[in-house]
Image (tube, rainbow, N blue to C red):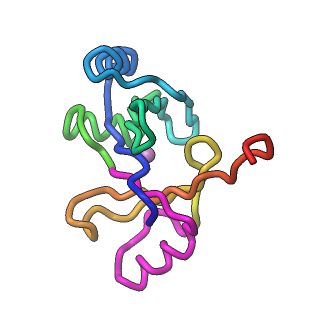
Amino acid sequence: MTSIDHVGVAVADLAGAIAFYESTLGLRLTHTEVNRSSGITEAMLAGDEPGACLQLLAPTTPSSVIAKFLDRSGPGVQHVAFRVDDLEAVSGSFRTSRVRMLYEHAVAGTSGSLINFAHPKDCGGVLIELVQPAPPAPSDQ
Ligand code: CO
């Protein structure tokens, strides 16, 4: 684990939620992305200093996990994401500790990252996301 990467919040009204966090908390929108395979539109917001981001998640289809979350629990915190250097290694150590992972292998996450989720029943009721960021683009080096 290197840091908390972001906190994921399920919302029904993405534009309204972005406006709330921009105007009330002074966060700024840094990235939006549509994940068609999971039926989610997401928006990343950040503060002025480096640190964890806020990830707003809105469903694009009724079958999306976010739609089901909103039906069950209403809007609110859906997951906490931890940044790791080696996702497969951390997933392996979770499994050794009898923490079930949602996917057998990492799947594509935001901005070219690799992600996997640990089962909330094995993590004190918290849906934990592991994020291995994409390697920096050559222009960033
Ligand atoms: Co996330």
Query: Which residue is at a point 60% across and 50% down the rendered structure image?
Result: 113
- Answer with left or right where residue 33 lies relative to residue 27: right
The region drawn magenta spans: 80-104
Q: Where 86 falls versus 3 (above or below)?
A: below
Is 16 above or below relative to 70? Answer: above
Magenta stretch: includes residue 18: no
Query: Is residue 62 shown above or below 28?
Result: below
Camera-nearest residue between 104 and 50: 50
The residue most toward the front is 49
Q: Looking at the figure, which quarter contains the N terminus? A: bottom left
Assess whether residue 99 is covered by the magenta stretch: yes
Visible residue check, residue 62? no
Q: Is residue 55 left or right of residue 37?
A: left
Give how far across and how far down residue 79 sits, in percent: 33, 49
Visible in this render: residue 23? yes
Quarter where residue 28 is shown = top left
Residue at horizontal 21%, vertical 33%? Answer: 74
Extreme-right residue of the structure = 138
85 or 141: nearer the viewer? 141
Picture quarter containing residue 46? Answer: top left
List x then y, in percent, for residue 101: 43, 68
Along the horizontal axis of the image, is 115 left or right of 7? right
Residue drawn at the location 70% of the way across and 49% of the way down: 136
State left or right for residue 139 relative to residue 52. right
Q: Position of residue 102 (x, y in %)?
A: 44, 63
Find residue 108 and report its horizontal and vertical position in percent. 61, 50
Q: In the figure, residue 121 lies in which quadrant? A: bottom left
Foreground of the two, 17 or 40: 17
Residue at x-position 38% and y-position 72%: 100
